[in-house]
Image (tube, coloured by chain):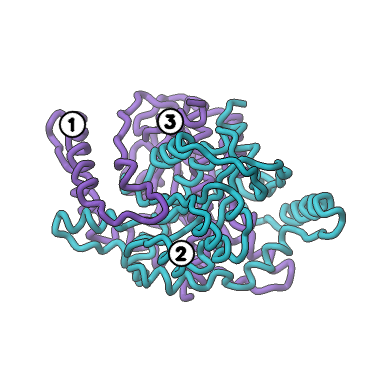
Chain colours: A cyan, B purple
Amino acid sequence: MNQVISTYTNHRSIRSYLDKDVSDEYIDLIVKSAQHAPSSINGQQVSIIAVRNKDTKKKIAELAGGQPWIDEAPVFLLFALDFYRAKIACNKNSEEIVITQSLESIMVGSVDVGIAMGNAIGAAESLGLGIVPIGAVRNEPEEFIKLLNLPEYVYPVAGLVVGYPKDNSALKPRLPKEAVFHEESYNHDLESIIDRYDEEISKYMIDRTNGEDDKTWSQGISNFYKFVYFPKVYTSIKNQGFDNNK
Amino acid sequence: MNQVISTYTNHRSIRSYLDKDVSDEYIDLIVKSAQHAPSSINGQQVSIIAVRNKDTKKKIAELAGGQPWIDEAPVFLLFALDFYRAKIACNKNSEEIVITQSLESIMVGSVDVGIAMGNAIGAAESLGLGIVPIGAVRNEPEEFIKLLNLPEYVYPVAGLVVGYPKDNSALKPRLPKEAVFHEESYNHDLESIIDRYDEEISKYMIDRTNGEDDKTWSQGISNFYKFVYFPKVYTSIKNQGFDNNK
């Protein structure tokens, strides 16, 4: 197994960090890796905002619903989907930007963010750093937008905490391959595979919590997905210029 | 520079493939790498459908608006955002799935697809394979959904052509770092940076086309983004169960 594949398969989220700074050289390699990711029509619909300022990080930790590792680690990278540069490109060529009226633009920007963030994660971990992705930048998106001065057509999609791990967490088991990987067409019969994974996750939780928590995967998922848990996304992304009506 | 970072920074899209199959062992490593990507709430909102059947690949090449490399390469991987397993999880726990009524679910699924696909790309390239991402699975999404038998709450986001490169394409220059990377807050003054990149891309195009094409980056972008170029996404994703009304 080469270094790329072993980096991926050893990924775990880190929520406890050493009081040790990350060098500019490493941040540069992480950003370069993210920038070289492929993007739709070479539009490069992603921006990265690095936050090292302690007060700003403290505020971000609060906005994300109370996540102390954001405060603790030296660097927070916000990944935003970005059509502001596309707007400049359209202006320059006397064209109206129309793509941002569509759901398509939100999907394209989100996928581009994902690929770029995936590269940033791989690069950071290959350098001995730890990370944890932060979806809760969408908890209070309007506040994030103000705090980091994001212009129209830019939207905060996810964050990444970066630092040196204090201790390694356990490797969390994934869904069985056959629940996720299909050959030639989608196999709809997944109930028994999910039952099997539920048992595996329940055992994993019991081990990790000394028996205090035995929640299965499907219990966790249904607890989250019986709500729209970040309900401010719909309105706040419209306020950034994404009409999402076609 | 380690193997992870050198793999990322050497990425290029390949549109010409050898007539040589990709082993099941390699596909397994690619899928394993994608599965180990982090995902929102460990929801693993991604499915991968591998297509090797020549007739199906030919049909996909057509549906994607005529992309012969899909037909030529031995493997096509469809990456779909997937809340079908979440629906099963909710059913099992007697809860109604509500997240799929929100734009939030489409964003989460698209980001998860991006991270997983980024890992698949890195893994494939680290094994000496070439890839090209295919956004045009969203050209005729309803046809794709039928062809690969995707159930409700599953949506085709992007594809990945995988094979052995016939020849390496050139490395395409990216936007200058300062157009994409911001420190502490977003820098809105990007016009002159984009002007500089436009000149660089124009020179790159002239070199690649023996002077036939001198299109700048912003000309290319504005040509695409003055339209909604995959207009069927909005309706077809509703038909898969994503109400997108909150």
Residue placed under numbered mark 2 in the picture: A144
Residue B200, position in %: x, y? Answer: 21, 37
Q: Nearer the viewer, residue A2 or B148?
A: A2
Q: What amino acid is found at the position of numbered circle 1 in the picture? A: Thr
Q: Is residue A91 above or below residue A75?
A: below
Residue placed under numbered mark 1 in the picture: B209
Apparent side of residue A129 relative to residue A212 in the rendered image (left or right): left
Write the residue at 21% across / 51% down.
B191
Apparent side of residue B177 relative to residue B109 in the rendered image (left or right): left
How far is disc 2 from disc 3 in space, using C-alphas?
Answer: 38 Å
Task: Evaluate whether residue B176 shows in this view.
Answer: yes
Q: Nearer the viewer, residue A34 or B39?
A: A34
Write the residue at 51% across / 44% down.
A118
In the structure shown, which secondary structural element does the residue marked by tag 1 occupy?
loop
Are labels 2 and 3 on one chain? no
Q: Which mark is residue B106?
A: none
Q: Quadrant of residue A21?
A: top right
Q: The N terminus of chain A appears in which quarter of the rendering? A: top right
Badge 3: residue crowd in 10 Å (few <14, some 14–19, many ≥20): many
Task: Evaluate whether residue B55 shows in this view.
Answer: no
How far is disc 2 from disc 1 in space, using C-alphas?
Answer: 43 Å
Residue B119, position in %: x, y? Answer: 53, 40
Residue placed under numbered mark 3 in the picture: B130
Apparent side of residue A43 relative to residue A13 in the rendered image (left or right): left
**Residue lying furthest right in this view?**
A211
Badge 2: residue crowd in 10 Å (few <14, some 14–19, many ≥20): many
**Dot 2 falls on which chain?**
A
Are labels 3 and 1 on one chain? yes
Of labels 3 and 1, earlier in sequence is: 3
Q: What amino acid is found at the position of numbered circle 2 in the picture? A: Phe
Write the residue at 66% across / 46% down.
A178
Q: Is residue A119 above or below residue A65?
A: above
